[in-house]
Amino acid sequence: MQMRGEQQMLLLPRMLMSIEILQLPTTDLERYLLDAAESNEALVLEHPTPPDPEVGRRGTMADTEAHDEMLRNQPDRGRSLADVVEEQLATEEIEPELREWVRFLVGCLDGAGFLSVSDDRLMELARAQGLAGGECELGRAIAAMQTLEPRGLGARNAIEALLMQLDPGDPDYALLCALLEDFLEELARNKLPSVARSLGLDIGKLQELLGMLRNLDPRPVARLLEESVPTIVPDILVEWSGDGHAVCLASGVLPPVSIDGSVRALAKDRSQPRDVRAYLRGKLEGARWIVEAIEHRGQTLLAVAKAIFEHQRDFLTQGPGHLRPLFMNGMAEELGIHVSTVSRAVSGKYAQTPWGIFPLRTFFQAAAGAGADKARDEVRELVRGLIAAEDPDRPMSDDEVVAALAGRDVKVARRTVAKYRKELDIPSSYRRRRYGT
């Protein structure tokens, strides 16, 4: 564990930077670039072109009450990690005592979402809070917490968080573990031939494995720990072009980035001291990484957005009530990228459409059940409508709601109905029953 803790920051800085920049929402990315420019004289940030004021007005004629309702019902982006965990615990079959242990552990996580406190210290804190049980309960609680989303929650450090995101059923699982556990220093020094020889691989296979590692997140919980609610800035614009809808990146929302030519010239100037030129070359390399990562972010985001709205044409022409089932894994296969890349590309990103501004994640709707052609939100509204029309003296049980949905050719499980009911803040049939009416 000590070795892992010392090596956790060595995982290919360029790789981690690209992952982080892809995942950051626009407002956070702007702050990231400002900080980077302050610490790197080779990186130049130009003043962004002010957004067209008409951009904020486009589509307002089509902004309906449904759009306003959507904005009101968006989840609070400032919620705590404890809130996120509590939502999952509500649907997990965990005994009450173990739930209390999991809640306790969440309170012990550090700012990155890691469980960096030693077991001995955890036991001291648990006893101080009056929790019943010993090391056995602590172990079970850690295991239970680490099954929750996002994967990596409760890891001891960044390396363990990456390991937790690997699939044990992957044929390359052992090799990926070995790269993370034994070869990070060599990888950070770009000693790929040496690593390949040690593992008995060719360079091509090693590059393939490194590509898989790039899809992992060393800080999977960090984005859930933001306290402030960022301003909504659309990254994607979807507009009517006369013969269809055009999808493009919103311009002027990020400052253009480039490399300072004078710094590049000084780094090549042999009249400068060697240590100065070496220092400037390091700064130039870091600046190039950022410029390339920003370009890759835009290309990936645009490709994903175009694919989304190609599938969601009914939404564009008919409105929010006509979302079609769409899965990230299917889109990843279609685009030839990893599903986690799709997830990061849409995380915290928004699209301005003729119907208003929507989170890109909104357009990924799972089918409600086997053989169903209705998206999750549509089925959830059906559940709301059925319960609203029930007899208050004899409210519908979840099983009866399942039967009623089946009568409409929508097949879902009882636990799915229960989950939707909780999301809609509708109490159980026992609590909904009105006596004496």
Image: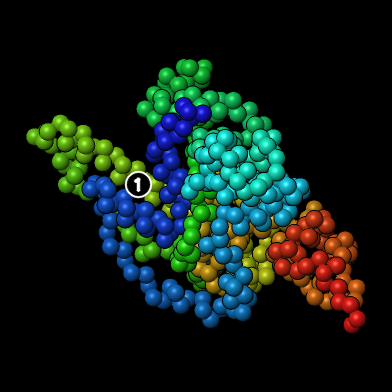
Using the image, determine if residue 331 lies above or below residue 270: below
Q: Say which residue appears at 63% left-offset and 43% top-offset.
A: 127
Residue 48 left/right relative to 93: left
Q: Say which residue appears at 52% left-offset and 62% top-offset.
A: 78
Residue 289 left/right relative to 84: left
Q: Say which residue appears at 89% left-offset and 77% top-offset.
A: 435
Using the image, determine if residue 390 lies above or below residue 221: below
Q: In the structure shown, which secondary structural element does the residue marked by tag 1 occupy?
A: helix
Using the image, determine if residue 319 lies above or below residue 307: below
Q: Residue type at mark 1?
A: Ile
Q: Please tell me how many numbered marks the rendered image carries.
A: 1
Q: Which of the 4 image quarters holds residue 155? A: top right
Q: Which of the 4 image quarters holds residue 132? A: top right
Q: Label 1 belongs to which residue? A: 290
Expressed as whole percent of the image width and height from the top left, the position of residue 214 reads 49, 38
**Looking at the image, what colour scheme do you see?**
rainbow
Report the quarter where the C terminus lies. Answer: bottom right
Q: Nearer the viewer, residue 171 or 55?
A: 171
Label 1: few (<14), some (14–19) or many (≥20) C-alpha neighbours in 10 Å: many
Residue 374 left/right relative to 42: right
Expressed as whole percent of the image width and height from the top left, the position of residue 315 reads 63, 67
Does the image show residue 310? no
Q: Nearer the viewer, residue 252 or 436?
A: 436
